[in-house]
Image: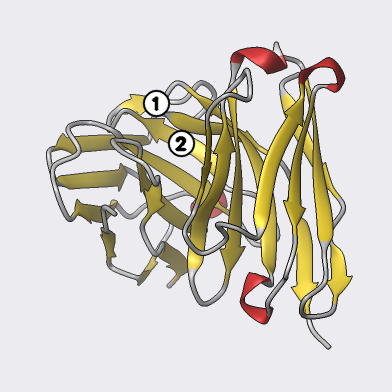
Amino acid sequence: DIQMTQSPSSLSASVGDRVTITCRASQTISSYLNWYQQKPGKAPKLLIYGASSLQSGVPSRFSGSGSGTDFTLTISSLQPEDFATYYCQQSYSSPRTFGQGSKVEIK
Amino acid sequence: QVQVVESGGGLVKPGGSLRLSCAASGFTFSDYYMTWIRQTPGKGLEWVSYISGSGSTIYHADSVKGRFTISRDNAKNSLYLQMNSLRAEDTAMYYCAREYLNWFDPWGQGTLVTVSS
């Protein structure tokens, strides 16, 4: 199975900050990498697919980059509604696997 | 709109059984792979089972193989997960999701399964 490792596991940031979360795969996954946002008590929601494509309706302050084994999710200017947990997920091979999550908290 | 809604969760004793259902709407159900994903505080998100649009291709994670069975009824736009021989470690929120190309969207709101005596 492909292992997905996110860092940091949690971070504290202020509204307006630029936030970067990284995700590393245990083997190359090309660009088969997706990002999800989960708020408390809610299901995960797709943000980014194919490493860098923004899902319809997702604000442009979210962006994704990377290929191979190293990927990044960036929030250019953190908004109050962005405080949540973010997960990466590989779709290169089965079983699909997720990172352990990165929780973005209010400083 | 495109949505999926799970039901069937609840409290069950170890060794017991439960059947989860997922009702889909807003898309041509038979065209898509469908997936069950579970989430626990300790293990995070775990892909449990998937089934192809026709039902001919099925996958179960090793952790549930031989105990869980995924199925679908395309005439009813419904997905199912039959869970037998339940263990405490199966306690989780279970999500139904459509696999669209290579990603999961949408997800349902989840149904909670608790295995406890």
Disc 2, SS: strand
Label 2 neighbour load within 10 Å: few <14, some 14-19, many 20+? many
Residue at screen point 57% across, 60% down: B64
The quadrant the C terminus of chain B occupies is: bottom right
* A82 vs A1, nearest the viewer: A1
Give the numbered dot on residue A47: 2
Residue at the limit of the structure toward the front, as seen here: B66
Q: Are marks 1 and 2 in contact (CB under 8 Å)?
A: yes
Q: Is residue B91 left or right of residue A46?
A: right
Q: Is residue B68 visible?
A: yes
Residue at screen point 15% across, 35% down: A67
Residue at the disc numbered 1: A54
Disc 1, SS: strand
Q: Amino acid at mark 2?
A: Leu
Name the chain letter of the residue that bears numbered label 1.
A
Quadrant of residue A62 in the image?
top left
Q: Is residue B45 left or right of residue A40?
A: left
